[in-house]
Amino acid sequence: MRRSGKYEVCELAGNPKLECIWEARAELGESAIWVDDEQALYFVDGLEGRLLRYSESEGTSEVYRHDGVIGFIARLSVGWHAGSGLRAARGIPLSRREGPHLEGG
């Protein structure tokens, strides 16, 4: 760990090759979840209210858009939920996965 200005920087062992696989242009990308059975990575663009998905075999997609901020996503046995702020307790339900995308609920 080393300091760069006001930030601590973690250095990776060896020389890993990093490459950009998707220029999602997220305003605030966070809450990444790996779904092993789909071999896909889901994450939110919180400020823009988007749920995004990347799968190497299926490519990239925006799978849900909400007209407000999304602060978290959770995969439940009944499907997906997303929420933010005061709505976090009940969340914003998303339907089950249909084909390569989730459809907004």
Image: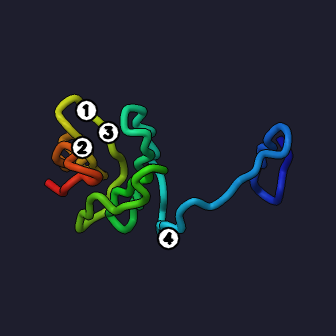
- Of circles 4 and 2, the one toward us is 4
Dot 1 falls on a residue whose secondary structure is strand
Q: Quadrant of residue 70?
A: bottom left
Q: Which residue is mark 3?
A: 74
Nearer to us in this view, 28 or 58: 58
Q: Do the residues bearing badges 2 and 1 touch, measured as CB atoms within 8 Å?
A: yes
| Alpha carbon distance from label 4 to label 2 | 23 Å
Q: Which residue is mark 4?
A: 25
Residue 100 is situated, as x and y percent measured from the top left of the image, at 29, 52
Q: Residue at x 14, y 54 (%)?
A: 105
The disc, 2 or 3, on the residue closer to the chain's N-terminal end is: 3
| Alpha carbon distance from label 2 to label 1 | 7 Å
Dot 4 falls on a residue whose secondary structure is loop
Q: Quadrant of the N terminus?
A: top right
Nearer to us in this view, 15 or 86: 15
Q: Do the residues bearing badges 1 and 3 touch, measured as CB atoms within 8 Å?
A: yes
- Of circles 4 and 3, the one toward us is 4
Residue 3 is situated, as x and y percent measured from the top left of the image, at 84, 50
Q: Do the residues bearing badges 4 and 3 touch, measured as CB atoms within 8 Å?
A: no
Which amino acid, mark 3? Ala
Tell me if 8 is positioned left or right of 87 in this view.
right
Q: Which residue is mark 2?
A: 81
Which amino acid, mark 2? His
Q: Residue at x 48, y 50 (%)?
A: 56
Residue 38 is situated, as x and y percent measured from the top left of the image, at 37, 38
Q: Which residue is mark 1?
A: 76
Which amino acid, mark 1? Leu
